[in-house]
Image (cartoon, helix red, strand yellow):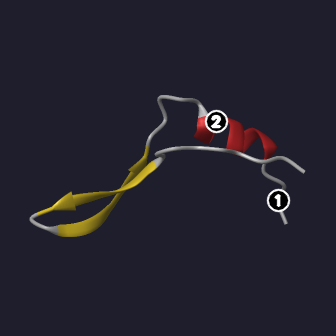
Amino acid sequence: MLAYLTSHIGGSDKKNGIRVSVQLNEENGLLESLRKNWKNG
């Protein structure tokens, strides 16, 4: 089992007081690691 511990991955932002979806933060390498380790189906 692989576990990821994060503090803030992005995915949402507040605009005009409303939460909206945004792209996940790629600066820390989390998305690259998820793509590498994700098992397809």
Q: Image quadrant of residue 17?
A: bottom left
Q: Image quadrant of residue 11?
A: bottom left
Question: Can you name the residue that lies furthest to the bottom here?
Answer: 18
Q: Nearer the viewer, residue 6 or 30?
A: 6
In the rendered image of this protein, does residue 40 appear above or below residue 38? below
Which of discs 2 and 1 lies nearer the camera? The answer is 2
Dot 1 corresponds to which residue?
40
Residue 19 lies, in percent from the top left, at 26, 67
Residue 30 lies, in percent from the top left, at 61, 38
User: Regarding mark 1 in the picture, which secondary structure is present there?
Assistant: loop
What residue is shown at x 84% (from left), y 55% (from top)? 39
The type of residue carrying mark 1 is: Asn
How many labels were placed on the picture? 2
In the rendered image of this protein, does residue 18 appear above or below residue 11? below
* Dot 2 and dot 1 residues touching (CB under 8 Å): no
Q: Residues within 10 Å of mark 2 (few under 14, many from 20)?
A: few
Question: Can you name the residue that lies furthest to the left here?
Answer: 16
The type of residue carrying mark 2 is: Glu
For marks 2 and 1 on the same chain, the one whose residue lies earlier in the sequence:
2
User: Regarding mark 2 in the picture, which secondary structure is present there?
Assistant: helix
Q: Image quadrant of residue 5?
A: top right
Residue 27 lies, in percent from the top left, at 47, 29
Instruction: Give the label on residue 19, or none.
Output: none
Relative to 20, is 32 on the left or the right?
right
Relative to 1, is 10 on the left or the right?
left
In which quadrant is the C terminus drawn? Answer: bottom right
Question: Can you name the residue that lies furthest to the right here?
Answer: 1
What residue is shown at x 9% (from left), y 65% (from top)? 16
What residue is shown at x 44% (from left), y 40% (from top)? 25
Instruction: Give the label on residue 32, or none.
Output: 2
Q: CA distance from mark 2 to mark 1?
A: 15 Å
